[in-house]
Image: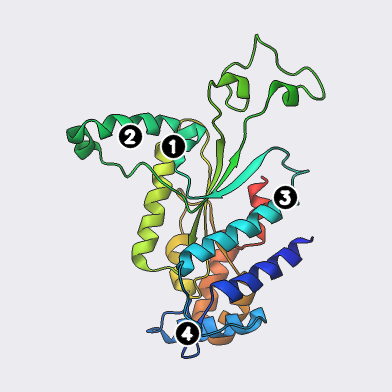
Amino acid sequence: MKLAELRKEYHRRICQHVLRLSDGIPNIADVGNRASKAIALRLVEQLEYSVTEEILSGQSKGVLFEQVTREFLNKAFSLLLHLRPGEWRFEIGRSIADFEQYRHLAYLQETLSRNPELASALGSDYLVTPDIIVARSPLSDREINRIDQVVDESLARYSPLRAINRSEFTPLLHASISCKWTIRSDRSQNVRTEALNLIRNRKGHTPKIVIVTAEPLPTRLASLALGTGDLDCVYHFALPELTQAVKEISEDQADMLDTMINGNRLRDISDLPLDLAI
């Protein structure tokens, strides 16, 4: 299946399971903001899939957005395994303490649980549970030496990519993906705090840190996309459709959107699988 086909299926499932209309307004819009409502409505019209006014039951739209996005990324990345071979996992609800760069945090948490005073002093904000994680499994020596004798018992005894170097199976955290159906000011700060914790508390390489969102208003996208140092990039679930909608609705918002796109701070969801392969 081609990436374009997977993207269409992604949008179909979002329209079926997550997007809803309330009095004709999509649930990605801020009902108190005229531009947000107009852009959201035009964006949804371009998706060409029907959207109902049925009330979401059971799981919240945020959880559903995570699930649909994880499935899309998993399928899309499988098309690129010839570029990034290995055993890869796309999972929801995993603590960073489960992974090589952050396994020391599990020991720290255990110590803090036995010492309330120390826990009060240090806090626990360092332990992040990303919405979606992308992880790579360590490799056996057989796989590493499949083409030629690369490693033996005398060398490379510390690299976590080599499974024999760890007594327990510990996958490598390749990417942390936050899914934000919409963006409000409080959510922006939470995302940046989580990103900084991932950067500061690692032992080893920093995972890719990205956000996927359906937020329609460029000025709110800018609260996360502009600036560098904590987030790699922001990905929109339908960027070409958003770009067209914004051009039709607001020139000022269109200028802001162009700034983020041309500045390599905002990309489409179809770009993310390829960026994960870097």
Residue 97 badge: 1
Q: Is mark 3 on a helix, strand or loop?
A: helix
Residue identifier under label 4: 37
Number of marks in picture = 4
Q: Is mark 4 on a helix, strand or loop?
A: helix
Sequence order check: which comes first, mark 2 or mark 1?
1
Q: Where residue 273 appears, x then y in whole percent?
A: 66, 53
Of residues 170 and 215, the one drawn nearer to the viewer in this rendering:
170
Q: Where residue 257 appears, x then y in whole percent?
A: 54, 71
Q: Where residue 269 appears, x then y in whole percent?
A: 62, 62
Q: Where residue 186 appears, x then y in whole percent?
A: 33, 63
Image quarter (top left, top right, bottom left or bottom right) of the N terminus: bottom right
* Residue at mark 1 to residue at mark 4: CA–CA distance: 40 Å
> Residue, x 17% and y 34% (percent of image)?
117
* Residue at mark 4 to residue at mark 3: CA–CA distance: 36 Å
**Which marked residue is nearer to the observer: mark 4 or mark 3?**
3
Residue identifier under label 3: 78
Sequence order check: which comes first, mark 3 or mark 2?
3
Residue identifier under label 2: 109
Residues packed near mark 3 inside 10 Å, few (<14), some (14 to 19) or many (20 plus): some
Amino acid carrying label 3: it is Ser
Sequence order check: which comes first, mark 1 or mark 4?
4
Mark yes or no: residue 250 visible: no
Q: Is mark 1 on a helix, strand or loop?
A: helix
- Residue extending furthest bottom? 23
- Residue extending furthest top? 154
Q: Do the numbered discs 2 and 1 sit on residues whose CB atoms are within 8 Å?
A: yes
Sequence order check: which comes first, mark 4 or mark 3?
4
Amino acid carrying label 4: it is Lys
